[in-house]
Image: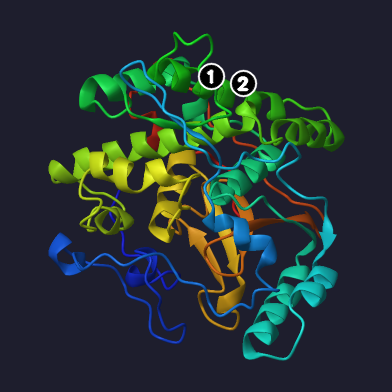
Amino acid sequence: MKRKRRKKNVTAAEAMGGEEDPKEEAHQGPSTLADVREEYRPPVEDLGVSEEEDLYRGAEDLPHGPVKHAGSGALFESTLPKAEDRCSLEPMLDILSYSESEWKGNTTKSTLIRKGYTKLSQRFESLRRVRGDNYCALRATLFQVLSTSTQPPVWLQVEHISTWAEELEAREGLIGQWMFPSECRQGDGSEDAVQQLKRYMELLQNRWQAAVGCSSMEERQRLCESVFQGGEEELGLLEALKLLMLVRASEFHTTMQEGGDVPVFCWLLYARDSSDCPRTFLSNHLSRVGFSGGLEQVEMFLLGYALQCTIQVYRLYMTDTEEFVTYYPDDHKEDWPCVCLVTEDDRHYNVPVGQHNGLQVPEDVTAIPEDVPPDCLDSKSQADCH
């Protein structure tokens, strides 16, 4: 996998969480780690949205629920609010009607967001709002993957996927202190973090294959609605995505240490003082996703690579700039399947649905070799991104 300079979609500073002037020329990517090792900056801050406008996104800054820490056979529970027992995605809303009701007034911000929604409505009919509990980027992406996949990726069809947590723990000792939301009960109490994540990886494998195997869109819709109910099944699947991200991040870090080629975002991921290796990435960033923080933009690239899926995001606050439509990553648009999200602020993500004229995604025609190499994540699917 060749290390590339990214095109004018996301600037280096932006990918690391800092704010950037939308009109400024995008950074073309660093050539060395020293070029990008600068003081870590927090995620994009609130962009001046009024309290009334931001109500539906307010939960994004709140922890998800009681946190259970795995390790040493003990569980420690905090007193945080639990998730509501309802579908994690609201029913479909007409995009233009939603835009007019949520972004009233004639402020520059409201006018810009409404214009972005107008452009989005030229491709999609409706919007489904996603529960804002710091899992939203993972939740929105997984919902779209299960809703639109025509073929499971090669890496998901490999039997040893369920052993990745055990292998990562044996190699780097990263799994023992994994944090789970309270909804993810640990069976009868004898299940450790490795076993629990193994179960969730198997669940991801089964649900993805079941979604692909649905005989109609109605059947697939019912399956997705049953999965995204805020309980252990949904949150376990989201924790499985976090494990996939950690596995991929560890592989990239090893390649970097050996002097191999990696995508340019890896240099940004590990340029942060708070994330200079897989262990600090997990403890300071990934473990907080779903609890006290969401994914930063550089981690959206990692999510795309972990899933082998291009995540196309309409960034409404960047309307009329080259960053209005951004791809995570942008170097596999022709050979990976694509899912689409929408955000108003790079913090909370919702799901556009009902594409005009239907969503045309060719089937993955990649055959699975008899002996898939351990680095099976490098295999490519053949679906185009539209």
Q: Residue at x 39, y 41 (%)?
A: 287
**Position of 352 compared to 71: left or right?**
right
**Position of 16 compared to 363: left or right?**
left
Give percent across and percent down for residue 373: 34, 23
Label 2 secondary element: helix
Closest to the observer, 94 or 10: 94
Q: Does residue 118 lie above or below 219 as drawn?
A: below
In the rendered structure, which amino acid carries the disc numbered 1? Glu
User: How many numbered callouts?
Assistant: 2
Quarter of the figure with the C terminus: bottom right
Closest to the observer, 244 or 262: 244
In the rendered structure, which amino acid carries the disc numbered 2? Asn
Q: Does residue 63 lie above or below 171 as drawn?
A: below
**Position of 115 compared to 168: left or right?**
right
Closest to the observer, 27 or 290: 290
Q: Does residue 135 lie above or below 376 as drawn?
A: below
Give percent across and percent down for residue 195: 43, 15
Q: Which residue is mark 2?
A: 206
Label 1 secondary element: helix
Quarter of the figure with the N terminus: top left
Q: Residue at x 26, y 64 (%)?
A: 40
Q: Residue at x 76, y 31 (%)?
A: 226
Is mark 1 in CB contact (under 8 Å) with mark 2? yes
Q: Which residue is mark 1?
A: 202
Residue 107 can be seen, yes or no:
yes
Give percent across and percent down for residue 27: 32, 75
How is the structure coloured here? rainbow
The image quadrant that residue 56 belongs to is bottom right
Give percent across and percent down for residue 60: 57, 56
